[in-house]
Image (tube, helix red, strand yellow):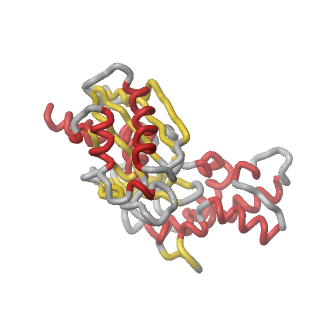
Amino acid sequence: MNLIGVDIGGSHISAARVEWDGVNAQTVDFFEADVDTSRNSEAIISDWSAVIRKAAGDRKDIQIGIAMPGPYDYPNGISLIKDQGKMKSLYGLSVKNLLAERLGISPESIAFTNDAEAFLAGESLAGAGRNFENSIGLTLGTGLGSAIKIQEVIKDAKLWTAPFRDGIAEDYLGTAWFVGYLKERFGKSVYGVKDLLSPEFDQAIAEEVFSQFGKTLGEFLSIYVIRLQCQGVVLGGKISRAADRFLPYTKSYLEKFDYPLQIRVSELEEKAALIGACLPFISNTSSNQS
């Protein structure tokens, strides 16, 4: 199998060859690019195809797994994104067929997966989510991505819109919360979590902010992990890189429920979605061999 894993966002694409030996997965020939998706469909498809071609090299017999944010008709590869300002020109089009035509391959050689599902699939297959029968994957960043794994089935959990406190979960578990809390509580302006980690930033304030965030994450997880009988939670996204600052507070909050839960930070980072997006082809191969 010549597997190519692709992760597409509103302004970025990354692609790499995925090597899977039945136990371990790794990525090689990694390429990425910024893409202006406010342009016409032909320009977007052209830019995406160029990056995918670089990862594929001179290999002709390729299978491409693509992690893509929703809303999407994933089985048919049709974009349903229309109100987010990005990828507007692709609305209602079969991106699967457009890419297949541009790359000169069969549409059956391309599979689309929700990006949150791909993240958890990759970590479950070859990263921090191994050995969890039931688990939750959260990507913490500008937005909140989420997926749930129950045995072999992984689904987009759409928890970003889940009612929480005075709003929805994303109000409290994304970058906007850090920006708003620091402005309101301390009168400080920051762009994101990275600013709090700077040696120049008041670390006493940073500690209070991370403690609040950690407890909030614990409160949010407590709603779901017991109900779903999860053994573990896998955290990804840029905010998770500060996990050593907030996770102790999350774990402390959850201890009162006396429920055994492991919380792990992504081992694969940006590679997780690339590997997870190829799972449809890996699963098919495994089924055919058994």
Q: Position of residue 102 (x, y in %)?
A: 32, 36
Q: The N terminus is located in which quarter?
A: top left
| Residue at 72% in and 67% down | 180
| Residue at 48% in and 57% down | 145
Viewer-nearest residue: 21 or 132: 21
Asked whether the viewer can see residue 258, the reply is no
Which quarter of the figure has residue 283?
A: top left
Q: The C terminus is located in which quarter?
A: top left
| Residue at 28% in and 23% down | 60
Viewer-nearest residue: 256 or 237: 237
Q: Position of residue 49 (x, y in %)?
A: 40, 36
Viewer-nearest residue: 91 or 253: 91
Q: Relative to residue 203, is residue 36 drawn left or right?
A: left
How many numbered callouts? 0
| Residue at 71% in and 62% down | 179
Asked whether the viewer can see residue 7, the reply is yes
Viewer-nearest residue: 6 or 172: 6
Q: Residue furthest bottom?
A: 166
Q: Position of residue 12 (x, y in %)?
A: 52, 44
Which quarter of the figure has residue 45?
A: top left
